[in-house]
Image: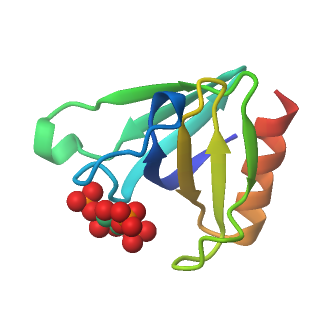
Amino acid sequence: QKGFLKRKAHADIDGKRTPWGKRSWKTFYAMLKGMVLYLQKDDYVKDCQSSEEVVSVHHSLAERALNYTKRPHVFRLQTADWRVFLFEAASTEQMNSWIGRINLV
Ligand code: I3P
C-alpha cells in the first residue's frame, strides 16, 4: 500500500494535545511495509534531500474520522503509544484501502 496522504498531528505520545504551530496539514508520500508506515516528506526542492518519518502501526487503530468534517475522506490513526494523526486520502476508496490495510497489521 502506497500513495500520497496529507497528515495532521492531533495528539502526541500519551495523548497530549499537539501544540499550536505543529498541527497543520502536510503532504507525504506514504508507504506501509509490514507494521511500519513510512512517511516521506514532500520537500525535495526545499531541502535538496528527502526526510522520512516512521510510524509503527502495530497495535494501532485506523477508522474514518467521522467527527472531522472540514475535509473529505479523512481517517484517524491512533497508535499504541496514544498518538493521534488525521490522514486525508485522495478518495473514499483510497481512505478505505488504507484503513483496511492498517487494521490488518
Ligand atoms: C493549525 C493549522 C491547522 C488547523 C489547526 C491549527 O495551526 O492551521 O490547519 O487545523 O487547528 O492549530 P498551526 O499550523 O499553527 O499548527 P484544521 O485545518 O483542522 O482547522 P486546531 O488547533 O483546531 O486543530
For the point 54% across and 35% down, the residue is 83
- Nearest the eye: 3 or 14: 14
Ligand 1 image position (quadrant): bottom left
- Residue at point 73%, 48% (across, down): 98
In percent of width and height, residue 70 lies at 51, 79
Give the image's coloring scheme: rainbow
- Looking at the rendering, in which quadrant would you find the N terminus? top right
Q: Nearer the viewer, residue 103 or 49?
A: 103
Q: Nearer the viewer, residue 14 or 73?
A: 14
Q: Position of residue 67 (x, y in %)?
A: 66, 71
* Quarter of the figure that contains the C terminus: top right
69 relative to 36, above or below: below
- Is residue 83 shown left or right of residue 105? left
Give the mark count: 0
The percent position of residue 31, horizontal first and vertical second, equals 58, 35
The image quarter containing residue 51 is top left
Q: Quadrant of residue 18?
A: top left
Residue 8 percent across, percent down from the top left? 44, 54
Q: Residue at x 57, y 49 (%)?
A: 3
Is residue 56 positioned above or below 30 on the image? above
Residue sitting at x 59%, y 78%: 69
Q: Nearer the viewer, residue 82 or 57?
A: 82
